[in-house]
């Protein structure tokens, strides 16, 4: 068992740009993990259905492949659960979006220019990127994104939470 201490997260209004970027990177890693697992599961299933050699190989050690598939499914559902976790100590999709809405200054042309400079992007190229960048004027500019994210998180909750609960044995 893990003895991880629960970390109290800063309120989104008090996050610095660097802290928000760190949380955004965390979400990016979680999404990548879930998508990778999903794609791997889909490919193993497709391979077993379309290749006689793979089908035969899978059936030489069916318990191994069944356990492997079950572990991947459990990992995928746990990842989805982390992305949608509404616990106050969880970094989730809504927290990152709410922090972005609380800090439209993170998306200013000046902030983007500074980040590009820190990454060593040449001035001319950085200026072109900044000139073409979308810059929000406030929370109203995030409404469409908030609505789209809310719809998708709700769909994940409706479709996958019951399945994940059965697979992981959580309530």
Image (tube, helix red, strand yellow):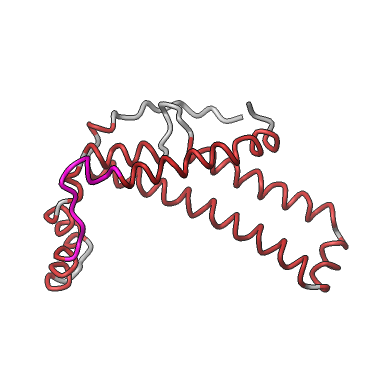
The residue lying toward the viewer, choosing from 103 and 7, is 103
Residue 62 location in percent, x, y? Answer: 85, 56
* Quarter where residue 54 is shown: bottom right
The residue lying toward the viewer, choosing from 62 and 159, is 159
* Quarter where residue 143 is shown: top left
Q: How many numbered discs? A: 0
Residue 20 location in percent, x, y? Answer: 29, 42
Q: Give the range drawn in magenta.
A: 132-143
The residue lying toward the viewer, choosing from 16 and 98, is 98
* Quarter where residue 147 is shown: top left
Residue 131 location in percent, x, y? Answer: 14, 65
Give the vertical position of 128 relative to 155 (above or below). Answer: below
Give the vertical position of 60 relative to 76 (above or below). Answer: below
Q: Residue at x 20, y 61 (%)?
A: 133
Drawn side of residue 72 relative to residue 143, left or right: right
Residue 23 location in percent, x, y? Answer: 35, 43
Q: Which part of the image, by quadrant, shows the C terminus?
A: top right
Give the vertical position of 12 relative to 24 (above or below). Answer: above
Drawn side of residue 125 relative to residue 5, left or right: left
146 part of magenta stretch: no
Q: Which part of the image, by quadrant, shows the N terminus?
A: top right
Give the vertical position of 7 relative to 37 (above or below). Answer: above
Drawn side of residue 135 relative to residue 2, left or right: left
Q: Residue at x 13, y 56 (%)?
A: 109
134 part of magenta stretch: yes
Q: Which residue is drawn at 62% across and 45% down?
A: 75
Q: Residue at x 60, y 42 (%)?
A: 77
């Amino acid at each position: 068992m893990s003895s991880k201490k629960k970390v109290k997260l800063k309120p989104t209004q008090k996050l610095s740009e660097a802290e928000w970027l760190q949380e955004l990177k965390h979400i990016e890693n979680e999404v990548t993990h879930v998508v990778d697992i999903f794609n791997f599961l889909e490919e193993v299933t497709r391979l077993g259905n379309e290749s006689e050699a793979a089908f035969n190989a899978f059936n030489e050690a069916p318990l191994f492949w069944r356990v492997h598939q079950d572990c991947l499914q459990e990992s995928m559902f746990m990842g989805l659960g982390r992305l949608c976790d509404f616990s106050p100590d969880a970094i989730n999709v809504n927290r990152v979006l709410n922090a972005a809405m609380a800090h439209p200054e993170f998306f200013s042309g000046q902030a983007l220019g500074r980040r590009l400079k820190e990454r060593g992007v040449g001035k001319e190229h950085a200026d072109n990127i900044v000139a073409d960048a979308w810059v929000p004027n406030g929370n109203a500019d995030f409404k469409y994104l908030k609505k789209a994210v809310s719809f998708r998180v709700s769909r994940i909750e409706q479709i996958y939470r019951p399945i994940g609960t059965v697979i992981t044995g959580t309530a």
